[in-house]
Amino acid sequence: MKKVLTVMAMAVMAICLSGHVDAQNRSVEFEHSSWKKVLKKAKKENKLIFVDCYTSWCGPCRMMAKDVFTQDHVADYFNSNFVNFKIDMENGEGPDLKPGWKINAYPTFLVINAKGEVIHRVVGAYGADEFIGYIKEAQSEDKNFAALNKAYDAGQRDGEFMFSHLRSLRLANLDKEEARKAKKYIAELKKEDLLKKENWNIIKYFMNDPATDEFRFMVKNRDQFAEVVGEDEIDSKIYNTYSKQIEAYSYFYPGKGRTYDKEGFDALIKDLQNSNFSRASELIAIALKNEYSRLNDWNKYAYVVDAALDLAVLKQYGSELRYFDSAAL
């Protein structure tokens, strides 16, 4: 009987231990040696290197370490496919490696080949599955950051490619390069090409200046765009682009040589007045209300708020204009 109980106890213990092991989350296994040794290991194992560039004060860095790199499927993916290296960019080798890697924000995640060449970069914190999706692009010969740059330099310019390239620049936090290339691509399109569905994602995500001829063309030809992408899509794009520019004017603060673009603001109001966009009156009222608030001109502010509340064209927007009610109090 004792023998039977002993065997049963051992079996229960084994099950418990097994369950305990399974309950422990696996983690991404990061190397803690020198960069030179990491390169050597990657070459030996014929693997790419995944680099977590972090700082001790970076909150999103800690979030990724705590909540993402400790998930089983994340650990399995990175441990199977990469030599993983974690480095504080303000200590040890970090300051020496930072300029060559062109680190400008944290966290920055790099994928580097065994030759030491950066082939992919992603900046910022993300959920586990989204992050894996972005890093998997590094393993694609034509979708990684370096490959897209090379194709752009070689002259590739079709709509699908340009969207992928501009998206990769955004993921890499290269805002100025993204804006420059997007503006150039859109400006060089023929007007009829703006209406092609292959260019819609570029227009939707990367055409952000309402003062361009291309944006004005889109507003003027709203109905034609609606036939291609749908009314909700085009109206949302027009409204949000105007709205973000109005917000930029509203929160302008002088300093460091910056001056308020009064000419640009007036041109925006004129464009809205001349447009046939259904929500133009609403946007004008919001822009003027914010402008007079910025200038502390409360008489004109009150006039705009009262006029906005009285305009029948605005009353259909209900919840969107509730802030006018509070502003009038």
Image (cartoon, helix red, strand yellow):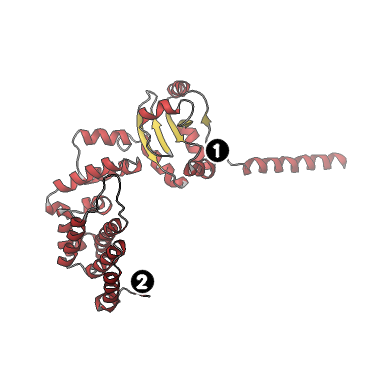
Inspect the image, locate mark 1, and give the three-letter code of the amino acid beneath it: Ser
Q: CA distance from mark 1 to mark 2?
A: 52 Å
For residue 230, side relative to residue 42 (left or right): left
- Which residue bears the numbered disc 1? 27
Task: Indicate which disc, 1 or 2, sits on the residue closer to the N terminus.
Answer: 1
Looking at the picture, does residue 118 appear above or below residue 235? above
Q: Amino acid at mark 2?
A: Ala
Q: Position of residue 43 (x, y in %)?
A: 42, 22
Please state, as top left, top right, bottom left or bottom right, where the N terminus lies in the image. Answer: top right
Tell me the element at label 1. Answer: loop
Residue at position x 40%, y 33% in the image: 111
Residue 215 falls in which quadrant of the image? Answer: bottom left
Q: Is residue 177 above or below residue 266?
A: above
Residues 172 and 99: in front is 99
- The reply to whether residue 28 is visible in this rendering is yes
Q: Residue at x 28, y 71 (%)?
A: 299
- Residue 311, x across and y down, in percent: 25, 77
* Residue 19: mark: none
| Image position, residue 121 (x, y; %) | 37, 36
In this orientation, does residue 47 appear? no
Closest to the observer, 57 or 175: 57
Mark 2 falls on what kind of element?
A: helix
Using a 10 Å C-alpha cutoff, classify the residue at mark 2 as few (fewer than 14 neighbours), some (14 to 19) or many (20 or more): few
Q: Which mark is residue 327?
A: 2
How far across and how far down the image is residue 4, in percent? 83, 41
Decide: few, some or many residues near mark 1? Use Cα within 10 Å; few <14, some 14-19, many ≥20. some
- Between residue 212 and residue 28, name the one nearer to us: 212
In the image, residue 10 sits, relative to residue 226, either above or below, namely above
